[in-house]
Image: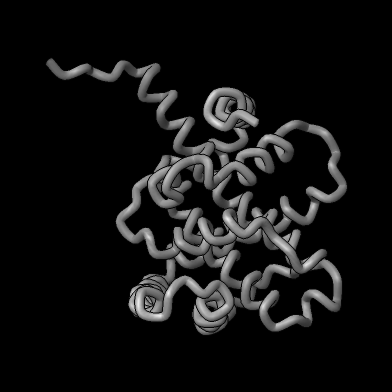
């Protein structure tokens, strides 16, 4: 006998999916900020964000990131952004998130560039399988894809941080790769029914969901 999902249950599932998709965007933005300032980012989170670019058939962030434990940084970051507290270091993260959503909107309307990007990612996935999961090599390939596609738009996300770290070739490549992963997460947000006005209306519910996820599914 199949269980029929009630309307409240369906809404709860949708809020969870939207929260995790937003967390995926925030995670990439947090990592970009960390690398730009210090040259370092949490390796597991970076790897999970990069690998999500090759989860072509994934319909949820949980699937694309192979479990919510790989989204912990994003969930915590989203909680902090929605808390209402004025975290000075979070201003750059918020700016990156808004920029990513704007670029995602542009890409959605640009079917030729979106198709080219997907083809390049599929080709890179084959190289990844052949060369192994070397993050620097992979980031270099993905950075080139970003430059050939997303960087063609007039709108650019201005990254702020340490001049020394930003001039480092590997750091620059990882930053572009993570921005690409954030744009990919924008599609997961869209698939979960997310939109700008829904974020405004459901801010409190999403904030509550982040706290619930951290308390019950990521316990530390």
Q: In which quarter of the image is the N terminus?
A: top left
Q: In which quarter of the image is the C terminus?
A: top right
Residue found 67% across the figure and 39% down from its top = 76
Q: In front here: 104 or 219?
A: 219
Rendered location of residue 191, percent (x, y): 39, 46
Residue visible at 63% across and 77% down in the picture: 173
> Residue 38: x and y, percent?
81, 65
| Count of all numbered marks drawn on residues in the image | 0
Identify the residue shown where x is 58% and y is 52%.
Answer: 25
Q: Which of 111 and 62 is in front in this view?
A: 62
**What residue sits 74% from the left and 60% below the top?**
33
Q: In which quarter of the image is residue 163?
A: bottom right
Residue 79 placement (x, y as % from top left): 68, 35
Q: In this view, does 174 lie to the left or right of 57?
A: right
Q: Where is residue 213 in the image (x, y as percent from the top left)?
A: 56, 29
The one nearer the camera, 18 or 112, is 18
Q: In this view, does 83 lie above or below 180?
A: above
Q: On screen, 86 above or below 33?
A: above
Snapshot colouring? one colour
Name of the residue lying farthest toward the left: 1
Visible in this render: residue 202?
no
């Amino acid at each position: 006998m199949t269980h029929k999902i009630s309307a409240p249950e369906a809404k709860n599932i949708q809020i969870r999916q939207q929260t995790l998709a937003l967390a995926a965007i925030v995670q990439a933005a947090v990592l970009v900020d960390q690398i730009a300032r210090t040259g370092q980012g949490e390796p597991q989170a970076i790897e999970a964000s990069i690998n999500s670019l090759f989860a072509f058939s994934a319909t949820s962030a949980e699937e694309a990131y192979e479990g919510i434990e790989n989204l912990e940084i994003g969930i915590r970051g989203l909680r902090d952004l929605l808390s209402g507290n004025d975290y000075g270091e979070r201003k750059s993260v918020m700016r990156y998130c808004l920029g990513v959503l704007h670029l995602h909107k542009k890409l959605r309307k640009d079917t030729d560039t979106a198709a080219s990007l997907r083809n390049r990612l599929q080709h890179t996935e084959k190289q990844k399988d052949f060369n192994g999961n070397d993050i620097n090599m992979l980031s270099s390939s993905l950075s080139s894809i970003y430059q050939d596609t997303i960087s063609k738009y007039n709108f650019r996300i201005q990254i702020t941080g340490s001049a020394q770290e930003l001039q480092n070739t590997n750091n620059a490549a990882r930053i572009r790769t993570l921005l690409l992963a954030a744009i990919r997460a924008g599609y997961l947000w869209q698939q979960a029914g997310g939109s700008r006005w829904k974020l405004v209306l459901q801010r409190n519910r999403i904030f509550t969901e982040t706290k619930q996820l951290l308390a019950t599914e990521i316990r530390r």
